[in-house]
Amino acid sequence: MIITVTPNPSVDRTVFVDALPRGTVIRSRRSSSEPSGKGVNVALALRAHDREVLAVLPVGGPAGAQLAEMLRCADVPHRTVPIADDVRSNISLVEPDGTVTKINEAGPTLDPAEAEALMLAALKETHDVAWLACGGSLPGGVPETFYARLTDEARRQGVKVAVDTSGPALRAALRGRPDLVKPNAHELAEVAERHLRCLGDVVDAAGHLRTRGAGCVLASLGADGAVLVDDSGVFHAEAPVTRVVSAVGAGDALLAGFLAAGGSGHRALRQALSWAAAAVQHEGTLLTGADPAVPVLIHDHIDRDRPLAEPVGYGPVPPG
């Protein structure tokens, strides 16, 4: 089984628009609301592929009640930790070419007792667990060391830990020596403090994270696929998709597929790209199964000079 921990979950409203001009009245083509947050999205992807998962998350206020009900309706097993503040609601604006503009609220503030209860709720469930996947931004009141401490405690219990976060929380998490981190290109550039212009830059930045404590780095690169750097080597994988509907949750589906296939090696990387390809062809995060017809290409010999489709500079990444 895989446990996911989401300290700052949300109810996400996804609105599909024909264009996004500023300062005008925009009418949506359609919209939907879903449970979200990185760990929640990983849990949704795992359930969509009939994998055993338990989502652990704080819940408070009307939005929190809605979130818990959404998870129940999606048949996602979950443990909720009551908090006084309301969980956040986010908005994703999706254009016809798949471009997503996200507006994320900061979220609630947890008091020390609530933050501790969230950690203990996750650690209480670690029997017969292969991976603990924790991710997303940390809400107010939760120390930057939360993921590092959770990683340390889980590893003491023999559970592997994957962390998907950004900025100070990612830097602090590396000190806990997680088995896996899954940054996207912007998060990787920020924490490594370097520009990413080609695949070689990605590989070097991933290696830098490993020297700081990450056991393995799985970097999601959007149209450029993903790069995996671990003890066995460096691998680049792609899954060409002819039609992108929405990139919402694609990186979370990538992580879910990788962990569900064991969290290492070619097989896991292939499944990760297959699940991510399914996600970008789907509206929102309530996925159906991966399309076996989508080809996944894995390159053992990486072309370090290959330029990225979207080069990335480094600077502060907005909290997720």
Image (spheres, grey):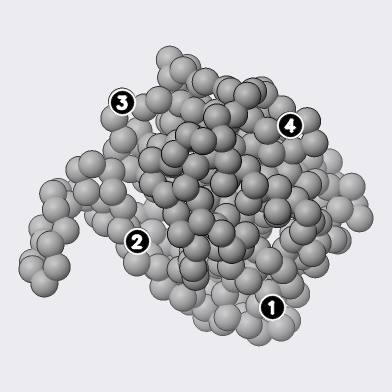
Q: Earlier in the sequence, mark 1 or mark 2?
A: 2
Q: Which residue is pictured at 64% across the width and 68% down the height?
A: 169
Mark 3: which secondary structure?
Answer: loop
Q: CA distance from mark 1 to mark 2?
A: 25 Å
- Whether tag 3 and tag 1 are in contact, CB under 8 A, the answer is no
Q: Which residue is mark 2?
A: 102
Label drawn at residue 143? 1
Residue positioned 63% across, 30% down in the render: 235
Image location of residue 290, percent across then percent down: 47, 26
Residue 233's disc is: 4
* Relative horizontal placement of residue 244, taking residue 125 as reference (left or right): left
Q: Are marks 1 and 4 in contact (CB under 8 Å)?
A: no
Toward which corner of the image does residue 187 lie, by quadrant?
Answer: bottom right
Residue drawn at 23 percent across, 41 percent down: 97
Which quadrant of the structure image shows residue 194? bottom right
Q: Secondary structure at mark 2?
A: strand
Indicate whether 5 appears above or below 105: above
Q: Counting other residues with Cα less than 10 Å from the Cα at mark 4, is it few (<14), some (14-19), or many (20 or more)? A: few
- Marks 2 and 4: which is nearer the front? 4
